[in-house]
Image (spheres, rainbow, N blue to C red):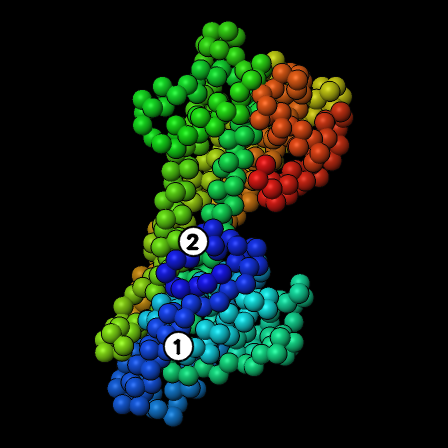
Amino acid sequence: MILSGNDLSLEKFHRAVTGGEKVEASEEALERVANSRRAVEKIVNNGQTVYGINTGFGKFSDVKIAKEDVVTLQKNLILSHACGTGEPFSEDVSRGMLLLRVNTMLKGFSGVRIEVVNQIIDFLNEGIHPVVPSQGSLGASGDLAPLAHLALALLGEGDVVMGGERIAAAQALEKAGLKPLTLEAKEGLALINGTQAMTSVGALACLEAERLFDQADTIASVTLEGLRGIVDAFDEDIHLARGHSEQTAVAQRVRDNLSGSRLVTRQGELRVQDAYSLRCIPQVHGASREALAYVKKQLETEMNAATDNPLLFDDGEKVLSGGNFHGQPVALAMDFLAICVAEMASISERRIERLVNPQLNDLPAFLSPRPGLESGAMILQYVAASLVSENKTLAHPASVDSIPSSANQEDHVSMGTTGARHAAMVTANARKVLAIEAICAMQAAEHRGVERMGEATRRFYDAGRTVVPSITGDRVFSKDIEAMDKWMKENEV
């Protein structure tokens, strides 16, 4: 994959991060990097005072640094800022951070040497993933603490994961035939000023949500068959009359899924209207999809953004301090992501309740083969309710909070990394809720007669039954939830 700094997409991110595709920098991008670096060297040699090149950082921005101390300044910056805490991010998040960090450098505004770019690319291609604690970022001045831990590994310090094993970064460099990087003027700041932690977490969560939303439409279609839902609610005319494109598209997908089904009903056949959790699938799923499209747009913009400070323009003739490291655009998108995914889980849990509650259907109570003697899917709904309730707390917007830092020099921050972490947790919880709905929906459809299912829903049922067998008696359903969750995470379904 050729990186240019300008055309990284979520699809390419997925290929490079979770698919492990090799990367290299375009020649044009490397030329921009070289030009930008020459500008930094000129500033240092001329003794100009420029923030981040020969000054302190944050509240220390007015402290001038002597020319002979510029290299020490950069290393001290990385060491002092590497104070993250908490469980490490996953390897995928760490790898994503490397990819995004090098992509922004290739725009040619950061003033780093080509050696820094090459070191990051070598880490990606050799599968060396820095161990980065997940907590400690305010989301402005970017993801300082997480990115400092990322930078540590490039210097041969800290730990990395390589070949599935956690080892010292120095050992990994030796294995890969690489040398520790020595940072020069501005390079430490260029490595840690930016939004790459929140954007990496957010991109992975967005990709998972995209897949999950497709699965939600399919699983909801099976539920409609299990509950003998009214198909008229998905008639195209209803949705065209409102005009929301994703709502109309969800209705189309449900109609396609139910094509040929003899389990769904028409209005007035058994009842006139279904409950909202069935009748309003297009409206709710569609709204979440509209929100996800916004999130995707924000992420792809940020993935190709220059987010460090200062930035060099016109071959260094113009060096400007600004605030592109502020994570607000991503922070708001991450809160939106958490909310729209939480809603998909919320409506799914209500469908689960309709599948298991004997007061709301004509199925065996709690889908149990022997109600009373066996509890069947009773506690599956409890688990879904617990996860949905947890999501409600996680979906509280992180971006509405701010706390001053650096002696009030940095007096408004985004909390975007917290928002991204919460969105990822909500997505993981939502997939478990939908896994529970899938288990219950398959059981209900089986009770109705799988031979009467639509072609698409029957394909899902047949594939799902290779993962979770029919409920013929009480068992440890936790294993079924985990199996279905894993299958959904790893497959398109």
**How far across and down, in percent of the image, does residue 85 sit?**
53, 65
**340 up-or-down from 84: above or below:** above
**43 up-or-down from 192: above or below:** below
Q: Residue at x 55, y 42 (%)?
A: 429
Residue in the foreground of this view, choosing between 389 and 250: 250
Q: Residue at x 56, y 35 (%)?
A: 434
Instruction: Assign a secondary structure to mark 1.
Output: loop
In the rendered view, does 7 fall on the left or right side of 461?
Answer: left
Q: Is the residue under label 1 in contact with that under label 2 (CB below 8 Å)?
A: no
Residue in the foreground of this view, choosing between 25 and 69: 25
What residue sits right under mark 1 in the picture?
A: 112
Q: Label 1 is placed on what type of residue?
A: Val
Question: Which quadrant holds residue 291?
Answer: top left
Q: Residue at x 59, y 66 (%)?
A: 127
Q: Label 2 is placed on what type of residue?
A: Ser
In the rendered view, does 87 fall on the left or right side of 286?
Answer: right
What residue sits right under mark 2 in the picture?
A: 9
In the rendered view, does 441 fall on the left or right side of 322?
Answer: right
